[in-house]
Image (cartoon, rainbow, N blue to C red):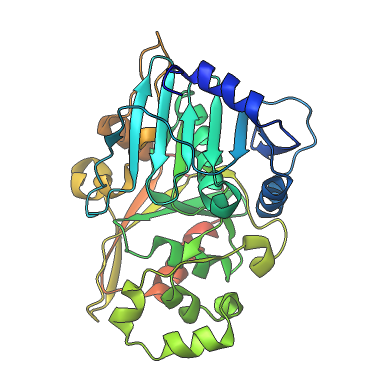
Amino acid sequence: MESLIDVKGLKESLLERYPLKASLFLGLGDIIIQIKSNSEALIGDLRRYFREFISWESHEDILIYAIETDRESFFLPFQEKEPDPGKTKIKEEYCDLPDGRIVRKRLTGLVLIFSGQCNLAVGPCTANSNQIVNFINNRFIEWMLRRGSLLAHAAGVCLGNRGLSVAGFSGAGKTTLALHLLTRGAAFVSNDRLLVHRRDKSVRMYGVSKHPRVNPGTLLSIRRLETVMSEEEREAFGLLNGDDLWALEHKYDVIIDEVFGNKKFNLSAPLNGLLLLNWKRNGVPLNIRPIDIAQRSDLLAAFIKSPGLFFLPESGVAPPDLSPERYVNILQRCEVFEASGGVDFDEAADFCIDFLSREGSDHVRT
């Protein structure tokens, strides 16, 4: 395949060799995504995963091809993608083509090819359907960024007509707190990636259609989630001490509608507040107080998320403004709080539900 050096050529070659057999439409907010594949099994897996977002539209805003095959050899000058801060393992390599980019997952061999109008996943797709889910959501994120949204490293929940985002550096517990809030009646908006967009004097948040992936410590701490693990797993993990349990990297999918019921996964909501988790497991009392985010660049960094490898600015179009100042400008239109002191999910959940239950119109800071 040495002679095929652009996305268009790669697409034409792959679709000729692997005829498509099945397709699926997803409605993510106002955006329709169609996935076409030569694997009916993969489309079946995606249909089950995205069942709350199935659309019966016959057009698409974004088209994605998922080609099931063995590992493909692309003889291109790939570069290693440096690990994110705090990480050491190199997981991806990439190569920029004249009309797009190709990313290869080093562990699975899955190859992801994309440009402005062309998106392909090639390789063992069915065995790595979680990476296909991520690719679909990355295409959604790019679409939203090109239309003025900002990407945040945050979870989101809503209750009635009010919404709250929860952010913190990796391991702070934002997903765990969000799931605590679902047990108290809130609806889920997003887990680890959140898009925020200013609308006149208010702010709206848009979730990513990915169910939360959590460690055993989270499952054992919330009774509603115990059935996500087997009884044998609960007993084995229950023998670990607290620090070892929470540090364990063994993830489980929490399928929102299976655990919390239908209509509990809302992909958009007003953003009335942001809670930044700056707490530690040290046994001291929890303290939650309002802050001026413009004066706390240390905490703003926990909210800002770089789009990474899977965002390509449009050719001939100025790239979107992703500066910290723009994040501050948006967040100054909602209330921002810092949770410091010791980790206390129950007390933090009390605060969040009280905030979400406030009467009156959306809070706007001018």
**Relative vertical location of residue 185 with respect to residue 364 in this rendering, above or below:** below
11 and 275: which one is in front?
A: 11
Q: Tell me which corner region of the image, top left, top right, bottom left or bottom right, holds residue 346.
A: bottom left
* Residue 44 in the image, given as x and y percentages of width and height: 72, 50
Looking at the image, residue 262 sits to the left or right of residue 298; the answer is right
84 and 172: which one is in front?
A: 84
Query: Could one spot residue 208 in this view of the protein?
Result: no
Name the residue located 65 percent from the left edge and 58 percent from the top edge. 264
Looking at the image, residue 189 sits to the left or right of residue 193; the answer is right
Q: Tell me which corner region of the image, top left, top right, bottom left or bottom right, holds residue 217.
A: bottom left
Name the residue located 73 percent from the left edge and 45 percent from the top edge. 40
**Relative vertical location of residue 182 with respect to residue 205 in this rendering, above or below:** below
Query: Could one spot residue 260 in this view of the protein?
Result: yes
Q: Tell me which corner region of the image, top left, top right, bottom left or bottom right, holds residue 35.
A: top right
* Residue 325 in the image, given as x and y percentages of width and height: 26, 31
260 and 136: which one is in front?
A: 136
Tag count in the figure?
Answer: 0
Looking at the image, residue 225 sits to the left or right of residue 89; the answer is right
**Relative vertical location of residue 149 with respect to residue 256 in this rendering, above or below:** above
* Residue 340 in the image, given as x and y percentages of width and height: 25, 65
286 and 193: which one is in front?
A: 193
Name the residue located 44 percent from the left edge and 45 percent from the top edge. 109
Looking at the image, residue 257 sits to the left or right of residue 269; the answer is right
* Residue 344 in the image, given as x and y percentages of width and height: 35, 75
Figure quadrant of the C terminus: top left
